[in-house]
Amino acid sequence: MRKFLRSTIPALAEAPIVYTRVCMYCDTNDGDFWIARDPERPNLTITTGDCGHGFKFAPVLGELTADAVEGNPNPFLQKFRWRPEIKLGETKEAARFVPN
């Protein structure tokens, strides 16, 4: 955080920290939702990712998750499939901070 502040808001770089907490932010490596059955545990379906703004997608995610659980065809499920080939840092979102 201090490094980020030095490069963006130098006046705050050495300011005292008066409060901290853990942010339970969850994101996938590429920034897309992950809605799929676990290939090793077929009775387990995972729905996660982008919790920073994912709450607003709850009605849509519920429907997609139901389709994944029930095995119903849905074109969006291909985009949100199980994808371990995507490695950390392969995000597409331009708004994410990228240090120099």
Image (spheres, rainbow, N blue to C red):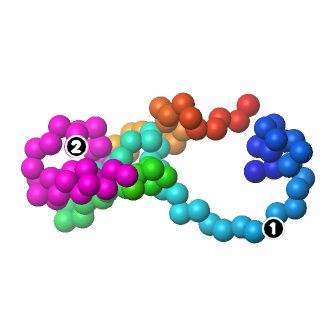
* Image quarter in which the C terminus is found: top right
Residue under numbered circle 1: 18
Q: In the image, what residue type sits under mark 1? A: Val
- Identify the residue at image location x=56%, y=35%: 95
- Identify the residue at image location x=10%, y=44%: 73
On the picture, is 46 further left or further right than 92? left
Q: In the image, what residue type sits under mark 2? A: Leu
On the picture, is 83 further left or further right than 28? left
Residue 25 percent coordinates (x, y): 52, 57
Residue 82 percent coordinates (x, y): 30, 47
On the picture, is 6 further left or further right than 56? right
Is residue 84 shown in magenta? no
Residue 40 percent coordinates (x, y): 26, 59
Q: Secondary structure at mark 2?
A: helix
- Identify the residue at image location x=44%, y=41%: 31
Q: Secondary structure at mark 1?
A: loop
Could one spot residue 90 in this view of the protein? no
As drawn, 42 above or below 99: below
Label 1 and label 2: CA atoms lie apart by 44 Å
Secondary structure predominantly adopted by residues drawn in magenta? helix
Residue 50 percent coordinates (x, y): 44, 49
Q: Nearer the viewer, residue 34 or 37?
A: 34
As drawn, 35 above or below 75: below
Residue under numbered circle 2: 77
Q: Nearer the viewer, residue 37 or 52?
A: 52
Q: Quadrant of residue 37?
A: bottom left
Q: Nearer the viewer, residue 20 or 72?
A: 20
Q: Nearer the viewer, residue 16 or 87?
A: 16
Q: Which residues are magenta?
A: 56-82
Q: Which mark is residue 94?
A: none
Q: Earlier in the sequence, mark 1 or mark 2?
A: 1
As drawn, 73 above or below 16: above
